[in-house]
């Protein structure tokens, strides 16, 4: 696919994540892009990103002047905002209006349980999004929500690089391997898993935690008492790939996740998934997986069921991987959709 010579796109985002980097790498092979990032800092994450591809504003003495300089020199056809409340957005939108540049907002769904915050955000969104050229909604739920504010909208979820070949060992029925990857914080509902494993023992079971956050000391203590519980801190992509390869089932019980890229990573490596109903990415993985209310008794039931029916795990994993390959969560597919929409 080739894009027009004048198809220059500027991204304005809060911070950088590894999965965004996958998308930008795939897109940069086809069109000319620049990425302005508000901050390098991201709680509980230590991503190793090639800084040469990004302009980080926390390194700049006069950020507004630098933003204006980048827009003037780069002359983007479109600017993509990775959020609707980003610092300097109002200033950039004034330039957009003056230069007749297209503007798009790339947005996750909002947490509907926080009624007052949602009400206030709707007022702000109505004002901001009606002036935008279009919206890139992260998931179908987000698309349905944001369509109220702007009809020019597509579903463009976060995406990752699909790995052509993976080595997956056979499932050991004497040790079914469960995995949690992510921030060890309250929103991820990590205490449900910790409390369950502190009071219950499962046969033929191993649990691995990967990540950092407020619950890491509790998990570390738990791992010292139980040899079937393993804990790793934050892991770079190469080490994380090895961990995914060795595990069978992802546990993903967030109280709320606008999307949840960890599920896509698990799909890439043929893992079955136990997921909360409250994560956006549940729409992408095989519906035969285990989508539950994020409660301890529900999790306990699913763990016991999977251990007794371990032969189903690889079938679910294979279905998940196939769905990922042909979905918009594969960065190559996502890039094509992005170009079609923004040209």
Image (cartoon, rainbow, N blue to C red):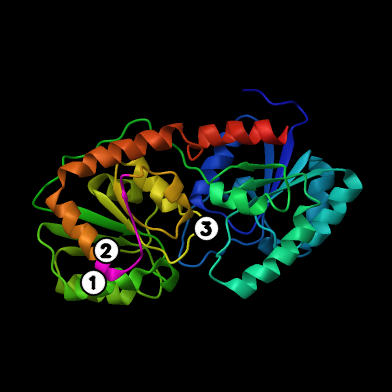
Q: Nearer the viewer, residue 252 or 70?
A: 252
Query: Dot 1, how many residues are within 10 Å of its Cα: few (below 14), some (14-19), or many (20+)?
Result: some
Sequence-wise, the earlier of marks 2 and 3 is 3
Q: What x and y, as percent, mark residue 91?
A: 82, 60
Of tags 2 and 3, which is closer to the observer?
Answer: 2
> Residues at badges 2 and 1 in contact (C-beta under 8 Å)?
yes
Q: Residue at x 58, y 52 (%)?
A: 142
Judging by the rendered image, the residue that carries numbered circle 2 is 299
Q: CA distance from mark 2 to mark 1?
A: 8 Å
Q: Secondary structure at mark 1?
A: helix
Q: Identify the residue at image location x=91%, y=49%.
A: 98
Would you place residue 92 above or below residue 5 in this image?
below
Circle 2 packing at 10 Å, graded few (<14), some (14-19), many (20+), is many
Res. 59 in view: yes
Q: Position of residue 84 (x, y in %)?
A: 69, 59
Q: Is residue 171 left or right of residue 116?
A: left
Quadrant the N terminus occupies = top right
Q: Which contiguous range is marked in magenta?
A: 288-298
Secondary structure under the numbered disc 2 in the rendered image: helix
Instruction: Quadrant for residue 252, please give it.
Output: bottom left
Q: Is residue 59 above or below residue 69?
A: below
Relative horizontal placement of residue 66, taking residue 297 as reference (left or right): right
Q: Which residue is mark 3?
A: 258
In the rendered image, the residue lying farthest to the top is 1
The residue located at (63%, 29%) in the rendering is: 30
Q: Earlier in the sequence, mark 1 or mark 3?
A: 1
Instruction: Depth check: give the residue in front, 220 or 147.
Output: 147
* Label 3 packing within 10 angstroms: few (<14), some (14-19), many (20+): some
Residue 332, percent from left and from top: 52, 32
In the rendered structure, the answer to whether residue 114 lies left or right of residue 133 reads left
Residue linked to disc 1: 196
């Amino acid at each position: 696919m080739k894009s027009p010579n004048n198809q220059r796109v500027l991204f304005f985002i809060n911070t950088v994540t590894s999965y965004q980097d996958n998308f930008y790498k795939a897109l940069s092979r086809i069109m000319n892009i620049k990425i302005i990032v508000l901050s390098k800092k991201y709680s509980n994450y230590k991503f190793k990103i090639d800084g040469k591809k990004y302009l980080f504003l926390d390194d700049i003495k006069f950020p507004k002047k630098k933003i204006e300089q980048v827009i003037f020199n780069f002359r983007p056809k479109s600017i993509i905002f990775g959020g609707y409340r980003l610092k300097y957005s109002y200033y950039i939108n004034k330039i957009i209006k003056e230069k007749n540049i297209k503007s798009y907002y790339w947005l996750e769904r909002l947490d509907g349980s926080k009624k007052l915050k949602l009400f206030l955000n709707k007022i702000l969104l109505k004002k901001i999004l009606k002036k935008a050229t279009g919206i890139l909604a992260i998931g179908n739920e987000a698309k349905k929500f944001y369509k109220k504010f702007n009809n020019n909208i597509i579903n463009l979820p976060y995406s990752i690089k699909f790995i052509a070949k993976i080595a997956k060992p056979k499932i050991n029925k004497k040790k079914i391997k469960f995995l949690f990857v992510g921030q060890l914080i309250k929103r991820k509902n990590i205490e449900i898993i910790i409390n369950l494993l502190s009071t219950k023992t499962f046969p033929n079971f191993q649990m691995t935690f990967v990540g950092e956050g407020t619950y890491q000391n509790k998990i570390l203590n738990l791992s010292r008492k139980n040899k079937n519980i393993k804990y790793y801190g934050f892991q770079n992509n190469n080490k994380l790939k090895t961990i995914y390869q060795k595990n069978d089932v992802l546990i993903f019980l967030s109280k709320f996740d606008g999307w949840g890229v960890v599920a896509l990573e698990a799909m890439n490596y043929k893992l079955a998934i136990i997921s909360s109903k409250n994560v956006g990415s549940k729409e992408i993985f095989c519906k035969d997986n285990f989508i539950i209310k994020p409660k301890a008794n529900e999790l306990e039931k699913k763990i016991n069921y999977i251990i007794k029916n371990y032969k189903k795990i690889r079938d679910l994993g294979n279905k998940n991987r196939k769905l990922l390959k042909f979905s918009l969560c594969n960065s190559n597919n996502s890039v094509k959709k992005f170009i079609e929409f923004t040209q």
